[in-house]
Image (cartoon, rainbow, N blue to C red):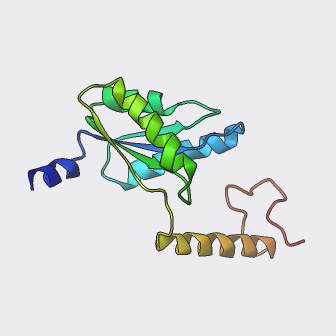
Amino acid sequence: MENAFAASRTEDTGVIIIDHGSRREDSNRMLLDLVALFTQATRFRIVEPAHMELAEPSLQTAYTRCVERGATLVVIHPYFLLPGRHWEEDIPVLAEQAAGKHPGTRYLVTSPLGLHPRLVDVISDRVEQCLQHALGTAPACAICAGTMKCRIR
């Protein structure tokens, strides 16, 4: 029971939300917005963004920031829909390398979003929002605002 209690503590647990990374700054900025939402909505006080490649911060940088903020356990969440090579191979290798530079820390790589039941609600909301916008009865979402992407052709 001691280990379960230790794992549930948040004051020394850091969370890294990692995506692929993009050459598009708007896409990379959305990860920052997601991290802000996650931080506001959860009990974790140490939360950092990371990109696998193409943009900063890297997983190594985010891991170091978590440790500097007091984390001894770092939970790394791949912000991907489905499992694949990045989850199975790339992120675990990057995590091991990052942890190796911080002796005394531990880490966990979570599963990606996958078939989580609440994703159906998210997809349904997005489909409904875009459909209503395309029909002219609702404003565009933040992603489509100012573009002509969300329209019936």
Left/right placement of residue 2 relative to residue 141 reads left
The front one of 27 and 4 is 4
Q: Is residue 65 visible?
A: no
Given the current orientation, which residue lies at the most extreme right position? 153
The front one of 28 and 135 is 28
Which residue appears at 67% of the width and 56% of the height? 142
Residue 107: x and y in percent read 32, 40
Q: Is residue 92 visible?
A: yes
Among the 4 quarters of the image, the one containing residue 20: top right
Left/right placement of residue 17 relative to residue 130 reads left
Residue 144: x and y in percent read 74, 57
Query: Which quarter shows the N terminus?
Result: bottom left
Q: Is residue 145 above or below residue 50?
A: below
Which residue appears at 25% of the width and 46% of the height? 10
Q: Is residue 37 above or below residue 81?
A: above
Query: Which quarter shows the C terminus?
Result: bottom right
Which residue appears at 42% of the width and 36% of the height? 95
Residue 31: x and y in percent read 56, 45
